Image: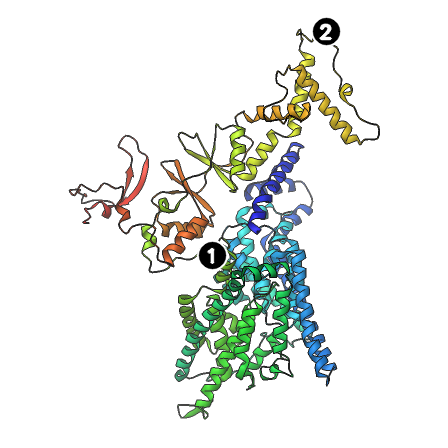
Amino acid sequence: RYTDQITDNISDKEAAKLLKKQAQRNHGRPLKRDSQVQIKEEHYSKCQGRDNSCYITLLLGEDWIFLVLLGLVMALVSWGVDYASAKTVQAYKWTYRALHPNVPLQYVVWVAFPLGLILFAASFCHFVSPQAVGSGIPELKTIMRGVVLKEYLTLKAFVAKVVALTAGLGSGMPVGKEGPFVHIASICAVVLSKFMSIFCGVYEQPYYYTDVLTVGCAVGVGCCFGTPLGGVLFSIEVTSTYFAVRNYWRGFFAATFSAFVFRVLAVWNKDAVTITALFRTNFRMDFPFDLQELPAFAIIGICSGFLGAFFVYLNRQVVLGIRRHKALSQFLTKYRLIYPAVITFCIASVTFPHGFGQFMAGEVRLESILPVLCSSLVRYLLVLCPTNLFCMAVIATTMPIPCGGFMPVFVLGAAFGRLIGEIMASLFPNGILFDDILYQILPGGYAVIGAAALTGAVSHTVSTAVICFELTGQISHILPMMVAVILANMVAQSLQPSLYDSIIQVKKLPYLPDLGWNHISKYNIFVEDIMVQDVKFVSSNCKYRDLQAVLQSTTVKSLPLVDSPESMILLGSVERSELQALLQTHLSPERRRLLNREMQQKLNEAPYDGPWANLPKLKHESFAYVDEDEDTEEKGEVRERSGQTAAYRMLGSRQPCSEHCKSDSSPFLCQIDAWEQEELNKNVCFDSCRVDPSPFQLVERTSLHKTHTLFSLLGLSHAYVTSMGKLRGVLALEELQKAIEGSTRSGVRLRPPLASFRDINRTSTNTKVGSKSKKSLPLTQSPKENSLLALIPSIDLAPIPL
């Protein structure tokens, strides 16, 4: 449904924007600058001979100003969300305790309070911005891949995400804020870059858009937990396939400043004495663990890998299970608040402290469980806490509210690791003997390792270990933590995709999956096997009627421009919005009126000795039959129509109504339709249209592996397939995704094993290669025509036995 809405409305909106920009240019406004060099030259030329105000404007356009503002805003937002949600939970607990010992009323308050907040969050997102629902990281991965998701990085989505996330965290449900804050920080970065474009136009450039999003993702994680180092590394691992090193310092600078302000605000609010780790622990540093404990740490990593894969699998099956039942899916779509209401009611009932919640610390908030698991011992937490928290986190993260899965999984991993630590402590009650000294086992260290391992398994990242170091303030367990995280990643990646890739698959977002390591079929599949050969194109000598037919028959964002339908030489690529603006301008009423006025001027200036020479001159008012009470716009329209009718008659139209005009239409409408049909038969002029002269092109023999690398590295959405400059087909992201899934998952071979030898004449077995041969030789069409066909390694010129 979201895709349909885009294809129906986006093109018209973009065309209207281009028409408006053209009108502004015609009124003498400056054209849009294309390069940063031109921008700087223009700014400095304006600054000559002026005061220091222009210098200040240039200074405000610097990168570090943008990064400081981004870090400051996100730190304030993060602290504000934490403060508001904490006060909400405090009021929730105070109301619950105030009703003691009335257990039925306590149960009503315990269930009704989070139920109201969750319903408010779901309703607010639905009516303000539906794009605010969910984590946000899967959509950010898609956007940074080059796909445009409209209305996703807007101010409405920012407001909906912040307000609904505050309500969701204040409800006490097992949801996190890490994913939503990545989305919030990205929106803030985009909006702030638009503001900064006032001072420096470089922020308007398309290449800078990805850099801004990369910095926003890093700041989102950094200000969420106060972990700048882990935040930058985590954002790189999660959102970027290929990372530009030039953004490294930007991410660290903005994330560090944001984390610093976030922790300073906590000190200012007297939540902390000084700037320390968010969940600080006090493990002994002299002997934190023994080498004999490494097998137990390895077991935590392996088990966390299986547990993380199972978590991702169940989360996906919950959503797909609802979709498979069409009646249930339609019912929940019609009544959107029933699903989050049922989930909230069940979770609140299970965690009721006087019921089942007394065995799983139901009264303890999610963030408050982690320090308990990492420091002191609460044995009843280890009985049912991991199992129940696992089920609740799987279901809660599917609610239509802004929610993340990092914190629930983090706490779940800490509970699992603490359980293993308590088992080890019970097996070695006297501790471990080392150098004639008995050292007690630290179960809290196992909790930290379990938290890092499980979150790494779910997100397929290694940087969770760094986040754990910064969260707990301890690096004493760095070796066992890295071992556990790596083992967890090895197991989880071999079983299931990451949680974010799983959501991408469920939402069917156009994201390119990764290629497997040991699939040789990716080298035997070529572009010619998966490309679309029936390509809609526009030729340089086409008519406006052909252009209109192409735009009506396809919904692609850009169309290839060829020399002619016979030669099919690719000249470039034109955006759909440009073509629509070109067609609308050609058939616009403004152009029709302009041509009409020019005709009238020519008729008035030129001597006319035709059959109507003795007739009096026609006036606009002679055809205006309007009442005095009508609007002035209607009068002007009728006068305009009367003048155009007179002009058409003065031109001596032999056929006032065209064959496309309906029989019951007015003569004026028929004449307009005839004019439009005549204009559609003219050749298209692409002089006023922006044409990309160098769209990305592939040759037919490009392998699937190389194509995947190019699409991932450059963030391409499509590429044209050419042969000696002639357009042969087009390869879009969707076709490439199907090919990769067919070659790596189901084992479907889209090409026979020996297909690389087809269409190649290798009958000659006496080919000789010179002793001083080069590593690769160019292959041309003929000695006379030096059209490059390919570049062949010299080893491939040797006889190949079949």
In percent of the image, x 48 and y 78: which residue is there? Answer: 476
Q: Does 691 sit left or right of 109 as displayed? A: left
Q: Earlier in the sequence, mark 2 or mark 1?
A: 1
Quick one: label 2, few (<14), some, or many (20+) residues within 10 Å?
A: few
Residue 308 against residue 324 in the figure, above or below: below
In percent of the image, x 60 and y 29: which residue is there? Answer: 586
In percent of the image, x 52 and y 78: which residue is there? Answer: 387
Residue 760 percent coordinates (x, y): 25, 42
Q: Which quarter of the figure has residue 50? A: top right
Q: Does 414 sit left or right of 613 as displayed? A: left
Question: Which residue sits furthest right?
Answer: 628
The residue where tag 1 is placed is 243
Q: Which quarter of the figure has residue 602? A: top right
User: Type of residue at label 2?
Assistant: Asn
User: Type of residue at label 1?
Assistant: Phe
Residue 108 against residue 191 in the figure, above or below: below
In percent of the image, x 65 and y 37: which residue is there? Answer: 20
Q: Which mark is residue 614?
A: 2
- The residue lying toward the viewer, choosing from 143 and 526, is 526
Q: Secondary structure at mark 2?
A: loop
- The residue lying toward the viewer, choosing from 227 and 737, is 737
Residue 52 percent coordinates (x, y): 68, 47
Visible residue check, residue 441 = no
How many labels, in total? 2
Q: Which quarter of the figure has residue 534? A: top left
